[in-house]
Image: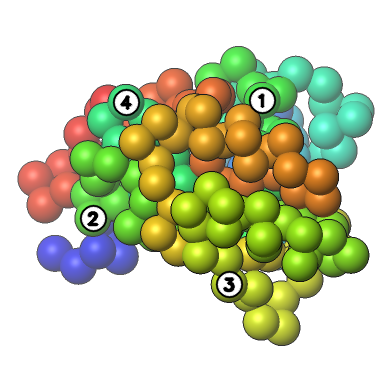
Amino acid sequence: MTQDEKKRRAARAALGQIEPGQLLGVGTGSTTNHFIDALAELREQVRGAVASSRATAERLAALGIPLVDLATAGRLPLYVDGADEATRRRELIKGGGGALTREKILAQASERFVCIVDDAKIVTTLGAFPLPVEVIPMALRLVASEIELLGGRPVERAGFVTDNGNAILDVHDLPLGDPRAMEQALNQIPGVVTNGLFCRRPADRLLVGTEGGVEEI
């Protein structure tokens, strides 16, 4: 079984988390795209969706799923998204698709955050995947130098602008023995919008696509 098939398996399992008439938040990325495609089967049961990116909004709209703004929706009962890395403590690195700020907002606004991944994303310690950090452009050099003092090696994501008009630094080799403390330390640097560590607000449930089925954590 390919990793893409495992992603699809986890994505379809997330349909079982949806209750009729719910508003839900929907993330961004390849696994979440499988979830959106499967969600078309339940479009009559879903009251609407809040998208974490323009790309997700376009995909939802193309399938006839009503789009709702978070300012109108308020608290969400459910948010479904993928991750670039996940531990069995349900701590995550997200932001490979560059939508980490809106994803973090939706996770915080949701009563339940269900993360869908294939088993290759499960790690013992976060950090092999470079950590995305969204940065206001005028502060790029300042933020990069501060991250270097924390032990990381920041690399600007070339030719990329977030939906919020900002830049992304992908940080390699950052020591993440205490990811919650690092999440807070990075967010304290002036010019950082947010970073891709989802540890202070981790996933409530992981659905992991494997060769043998879907594991729930």
Q: Farthest residue in the front direction? A: 149
Q: Farthest residue in the left direction? A: 212
Image quarter in which the N terminus is found: bottom left
Query: Could you tell whether 14 is left or right of 111 in the image?
Result: left
Which residue is nearer to you in this view: 105 or 8? 105
Residue underneath mark 1: 108
- Residue 177, percent across and down? 34, 36
Which residue is nearer to you in this view: 53 or 214? 53
The CA distance from mark 2 to mark 3 is 24 Å
Of the numbered discs 2 and 4, the one sitting upstream in the chain is 4
Q: Quadrant of residue 66?
A: top right
Query: Dot 2 surroundings within 10 Å: few (below 14), some, or many (20 or more)?
Result: some
What amino acid does circle 3 point to?
Answer: Val
Image quarter in which the C terminus is found: top left
Above-or-below relation of 92 to 94 = above
Q: Quadrant of residue 123?
A: top left
Residue underneath mark 2: 120
- Residue 214, percent across and down? 22, 39
The CA distance from mark 2 to mark 4 is 16 Å
- Residue 16, percent across and down? 40, 29
Of the numbered discs 1 and 2, the one sitting upstream in the chain is 1
- Identify the mark at residue 89; answer none if there is no mark: 4
- Residue 15, percent across and down? 44, 36
What amino acid does circle 2 point to?
Answer: Ala
Q: Secondary structure at mark 4?
A: loop
Residue underneath mark 3: 155
Q: Nearer the viewer, mark 4 or mark 1?
A: 4
* Mark 4–mark 1 CB contact (< 8 Å): no
* Mark 1–mark 2 CB contact (< 8 Å): no
Q: Secondary structure at mark 3?
A: strand
Q: Is residue 175 visible?
A: yes
